[in-house]
Amino acid sequence: MMTSYSTFFSVVLSSDMLSTVRKGRWTKDEDLLLESLVQEHGITNLAKIEKGFKGKRNTKQIRDRWVNHLDPSVKKRKFNEEEAKIIEENKFKWSEAAKKIPGASPLMVKNFYYNNLKKKIKTKATNDDNDRLLTLADLAAARKLQLEE
């Protein structure tokens, strides 16, 4: 018996694949709904929370939105030197570092690390350029002295 492709694909495609999961910015109403559902079910029960969104948001989006933006324990602020040291010691283990820093989310830790890394690279490049210029200036001064002699 031969199965047609259309029959095969209609069976294989699940409702998840056909859902209308929304991408992009979260609305204020979605944030309020998420806060309400987390209060009702707890953040560990993502399946129930996802049902409350009626297919408009998936569990990954829900968890990320809560952990990185809406969780009241997360405080958006600058990190101090001690916290920066913790981040450096735990680089690429954002969740581990965030657990050691009260009020920090893994996303905040990651962004801090990469933003500071960019600054360090720029500073190093600037210092290297300055060193090269000083070396060239020294060579030019030495050459000028040789020519005068």
Image (cartoon, helix red, strand yellow):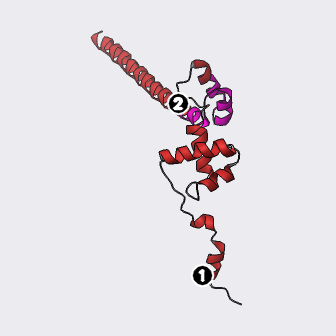
Give left or right: position of 18 versus 143. Answer: right
First of labels 1, 2 by sequence position: 1
Asked if residue 102 is among those painted magenta in the image, a careful observer would answer yes
Residue at the disc numbered 1: 6
User: Which residue ends up furthest to the top in the rendered image?
Assistant: 149
Q: Position of residue 53 (x, y in %)?
A: 58, 54
Q: Residue at x 56, y 29 (%)?
A: 75
Indicate the amino acid at tag 2.
Answer: Leu
2 over 138 or under it: above or below? below
Q: Residue at x 56, y 31 (%)?
A: 113
Secondary structure under tag 1 reads helix
Secondary structure under tag 2 reads helix
Residue at the disc numbered 2: 117
Q: Position of residue 104 (x, y in %)?
A: 60, 30
- Find the distance from the CA under tag 1 to the CA under tag 2: 51 Å
Q: Position of residue 2 (x, y in %)?
A: 68, 88
Q: Quadrant of the C terminus?
A: top left
Q: Quadrant of the N terminus?
A: bottom right
Indicate the amino acid at tag 1.
Answer: Ser
Asked if residue 46 is among those painted magenta in the image, a careful observer would answer no
Mark 2 crowd level (few <14, some 14–19, many ≥20, 10 Å Cα): few
Which of 80/129 is in front?
80
Please provide the residue range marked out in magenta: 84-112
